[in-house]
Image (cartoon, grey):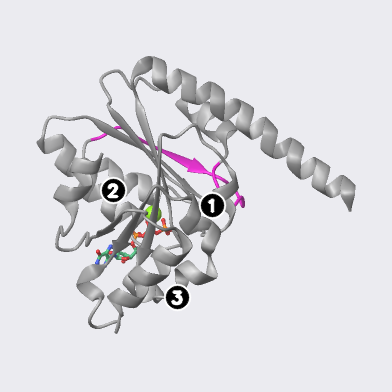
Amino acid sequence: MSQIIEVGKAVLSKNDELAAILRERFNKTGLRVINIVSSPGSGKTAWLQRTLARLQQQGRRGAALVGDLETDRDAQRLSQSGAPVRQIRTQGMCHLEAFMLEQHLENWNLDGVELLFLENVGNLVCPIGFDLGEHLKVLLFSTPEGEDKPLKYPPAFAWANVVLLTKMDMAEVAGFDLEFALQNIEQVHPGVPVLQTSARTGQGLDEWLKLL
Ligand SMILES: Nc1nc2c(ncn2[C@@H]2O[C@H](COP(=O)(O)OP(=O)(O)OP(=O)(O)O)[C@@H](O)[C@H]2O)c(=O)[nH]1
Ligand SMILES: [Mg+2]
């Protein structure tokens, strides 16, 4: 049993070492990196499509690296913005790790890119333990998932620097109790900023871009 814990620690510290190297590299080039985590289907790709399109309009440059177990469907969606995009296929792994970033950043010219978005694998548990050298940790939580998710998955909410409540356009039809959800987030992570957003209507996009 103790050996299993030691192996786990070793894997994590190896990841942390590489993440620290990546962060230093990002800092040297001025690239700001944003790690986006949520359960599957909370709207990470839809929100990034909106974000990348708006950045393009403003003459700012964003790029995205997106992780899924299989397919390049999300990379195809994100590429429609005209931004540089790469897909990571994790082949069964439920999170991104620093070594995957290192591999996929190789020979990728990101000159002039200001913001690199990492869309993590859809999962509220696994990605939390793996530093990717990011500067900002963002957790998405969609209204149809239910108000109790912060209470059931506290590490994910405690991890985040900012929480985005997504699919606000569906709140009413989902019977979403906004006040209760906000209370639960506050209970798990007091003071964390929460943005109310919708990729469908664009709600919250200005606030989000200001924050970035
Ligand atoms: N009504 C509504 N639907 C949305 C919104 N954002 C995303 N969706 C829909 O929700 C579904 C999942 O959205 P995605 O953007 O693929 O979610 P994701 O988090 O990237 O999913 P994975 O990458 O599979 O984890 C799609 O059918 C989207 O069209 C929103 O703000 N409002
Ligand atoms: Mg996605």
Q: On the image, numbered disc 3 is attached to which residue?
A: 148
Q: CA distance from mark 3 to mark 1?
A: 27 Å
Mark on residue 69? 1
Residue at left offset 42%, top offset 70% = 184
In the rendered view, does 153 fall on the left or right side of 51?
A: right
Identify which amino acid the numbered label 1 is placed on: Leu
Contact, CB < 8 Å: mark 2 with mark 3?
Answer: no
Helix or strand or loop: what does disc 3 sit on? loop
Q: Is mark 3 within 8 Å of ligand 1?
A: no
Closer to us: mark 2 or mark 1?
2
Mark on residue 48? 2
Residue at left offset 48%, top offset 30% = 104
Identify which amino acid the numbered label 3 is placed on: Asp
Residue 122 in view of the camera: no
- Is residue 102 placed above or below 42 in the rendered structure? above
* Magenta stretch, overall SS: loop
Q: Quadrant of residue 165?
A: bottom left
Would you call the spot at circle 1 few (<14 residues within 10 Å), some (14-19), or many (20 or more)?
some
Residue at left offset 29%, top offset 75% = 179
